[in-house]
Image (cartoon, rainbow, N blue to C red):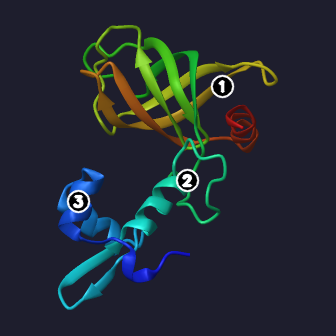
Amino acid sequence: MKNPSSERIMTAQELSFYLKLPLSTVYFLTKKGIIHGVKFGKHWRYLEREIQEYLLRNSRFSSNPHPTAPAERRAHPRVNCSLRARLVPVLYYNGDVEQSGAVRNLSAGGALFATDGVQADFSIGDPIKLVFDLPEPASRSLEVNGRIVRLAGGKNTCGIKFKTLLPQDAEEINQYVG
């Protein structure tokens, strides 16, 4: 083990430069306990060795991730996919029509839907029905009610939060997600 007096101690500003992050992010990560520092009065100090260890154990390239690494922030695991789908408005407004496209990622809590290049005429909060086919082993069509919670890509992509999901449908989605 190294002599503690020979280890590099960094200020918050030095750590900000070292990690190439804004100073406010360094303070935020410290406050949340994601990175560890010691406070002397108003001043934070960080051991370079601890920062390097944190980066190594939380790297996606690490072969031995640390067991206390932060958990996925989402309530439901998701998987990137490309499943043909239709987005159907539940309440029809002026000229609303169903949109064809694909589910780009899927979880038991919702989906990310991308139209086939046509700008959708939906708004955040609109109730919709998403119809898509699950591949093997389910190999069946699902119809799920939900709401649009996010728009992106010039309204070509929308995030959908499922409102009602039958237990059997949730189980099949969870099996597909893995």
* Residue labelled with disc 2: 75
Circle 2: element type: loop
Marks 2 and 1 sit apart, C-alpha to C-alpha, by 21 Å
Q: Which residue is mark 3?
A: 16
The reply, left or right, for residue 68 in relation to residue 21 is right
- The amino acid type found where label 1 is placed reads Leu
Quarter holding the N terminus is bottom right
Is 169 placed above or below 26 here? above
**Rounded to the nearest whole Å, what is the CA distance between mark 3 and mark 1?**
48 Å
- Amino acid type for the residue under numbered disc 2: Ala
Q: Position of residue 131 (x, y in %)?
A: 57, 21
Q: Which of the 4 image quarters holds residue 42?
A: bottom left
| 115 with respect to 94 (left or right) | right
If you read the primary sequence from the N terminus, does the residue marked by circle 3 or circle 1 appear first?
A: 3
Where disc 3 sits, the SS reads helix
Task: Classify the position of the C terminus by image quarter.
Answer: top right
Near-viewer residue (153 or 31) = 31
Say the numbered circle drawn on residue 11. none
Q: Judge the density around disc 3: few (<14), some (14-19), many (≥20) Cα neighbours within 10 Å.
A: some
From where the camera sits, is residue 156 visible? yes
**Amino acid carrying mark 3 in the image:** Ser
Q: Which mark is residue 142?
A: 1
Q: Earlier in the sequence, mark 2 or mark 3?
A: 3
